[in-house]
Image: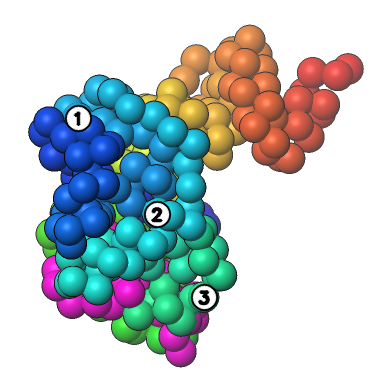
């Protein structure tokens, strides 16, 4: 099982119901903080959408996005504070600055913005922009997990597994992965499968392990595709099948998984 992944959640866009990009420009120029944030999202992604429909597109412009996010954040709009943190963390539209990223995440996190709480936990876990403090990382992960962040659940589960910032607790690891998996988190689905296959916080169950790894593999999670290939090759939790073993290992190898490429040569190049 891997250490917590550096998770940067995507921008959550908030759009007006009937406004065009021109209308947004007008409102943003007059200081409307929500229009400024929405225009920032449009510049960042290059797409202006409403209820899932894209009705205007343009070439993404990170520099303009940063400018609009900053204007909105300076007025205290919490989603913009978080988005500004992403820009600093990734170096999109501004020079990369992990200290500023952590500062922006904290502002949004202190206002209860769940994605910012999760990302601030990551900052503390890895020491990005703040002094490394895994106990503080656990505190922020728990805060976000308690209100439903499945990414925070997965990160907290790994902290329990490795004993990072908190006492090792395999049962808590299993519980958190199960919660995340049942809410559709692909990392949680894969790691829940691993829990069943390695008796982490639960009894050994090949069928359950294979079931959850299959779910993650079907969603193009490369580690799950690799693992599923091995399960089919060895007949663990599934009917033994070289055909399906090769299929899933090839899918993983095509995504650059070195272990899958190695196993394909080992199993099928004779």
Q: Mark 3 points at which residue?
A: 97
Tag 1 secondary structure: strand
Circle 2 residues within 10 Å: few <14, some 14–19, many ≥20: many
Residue at (24% x, 73% y) in the render: 74
Of residues 31 and 7, the one drawn nearer to the viewer in this rendering: 31
Q: In the figure, 237 relative to 257: above or below?
A: above
Q: Is residue 72 left or right of residue 91?
A: left
Q: Mark 2 points at which residue?
A: 65
Tag 2 secondary structure: helix
**Separation of marks 3 and 2 at Cα, in angstroms:** 16 Å
Q: What stretch is highlighted in magenta?
A: 104-131
Residue at (28% x, 66% y) in the render: 71
Q: In this view, does 108 lie to the left or right of 193?
A: left
Check if mark 3's residue and mark 2's residue have beta carbons within 8 Å: no
Question: Which of the two marks, 3 or 2, is nearer to us in this view?
Answer: 2
**Separation of marks 1 and 3 at Cα, in angstroms:** 32 Å
Can residue 169 be seen in the rendering of this structure?
no
Q: Name the residue under label 1.
A: 50
Residue 64 on the magenta segment: no
Q: Position of residue 6 (x, y in %)?
A: 48, 60
Of residues 101 and 16, the one drawn nearer to the viewer in this rendering: 16
Q: Where is residue 127 in the image (x, y as percent from the top left)?
A: 49, 81
């Amino acid at each position: 099982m891997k250490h917590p992944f550096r998770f940067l959640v995507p921008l959550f866009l908030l759009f007006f119901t009937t406004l065009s990009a021109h209308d947004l420009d007008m409102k943003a120029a007059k200081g409307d903080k929500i229009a400024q944030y929405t225009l920032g999202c449009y510049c960042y992604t290059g797409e202006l959408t409403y209820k899932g429909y894209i009705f205007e597109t343009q070439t993404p412009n990170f520099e303009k996005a940063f400018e609009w996010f900053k204007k909105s954040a300076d007025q205290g709009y919490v989603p913009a504070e978080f988005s500004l943190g992403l820009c600093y963390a990734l170096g999109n539209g501004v020079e990369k600055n992990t200290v500023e990223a952590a500062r922006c995440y904290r502002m949004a996190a202190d206002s209860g913005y769940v994605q910012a709480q999760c990302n601030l936990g990551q900052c503390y876990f890895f020491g990005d922009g703040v002094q490394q403090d895994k106990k503080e990382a656990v505190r922020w992960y728990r805060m976000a997990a308690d209100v439903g962040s499945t990414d925070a659940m997965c990160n907290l589960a790994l902290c329990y597994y490795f004993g990072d910032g908190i006492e090792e607790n395999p049962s808590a690891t299993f519980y958190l992965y199960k919660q995340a998996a049942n809410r559709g988190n692909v990392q949680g689905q894969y790691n829940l499968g691993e829990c069943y296959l390695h008796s982490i916080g639960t009894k050994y169950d090949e069928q359950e392990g294979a079931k959850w790894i299959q779910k993650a593999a079907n969603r193009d999670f490369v580690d799950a595709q690799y693992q599923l290939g091995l399960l089919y090759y060895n007949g663990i939790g599934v009917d033994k099948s070289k055909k399906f073993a090769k299929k899933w290992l090839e899918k993983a190898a095509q995504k650059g998984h070195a272990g899958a490429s190695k196993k394909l040569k080992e199993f099928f190049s004779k």
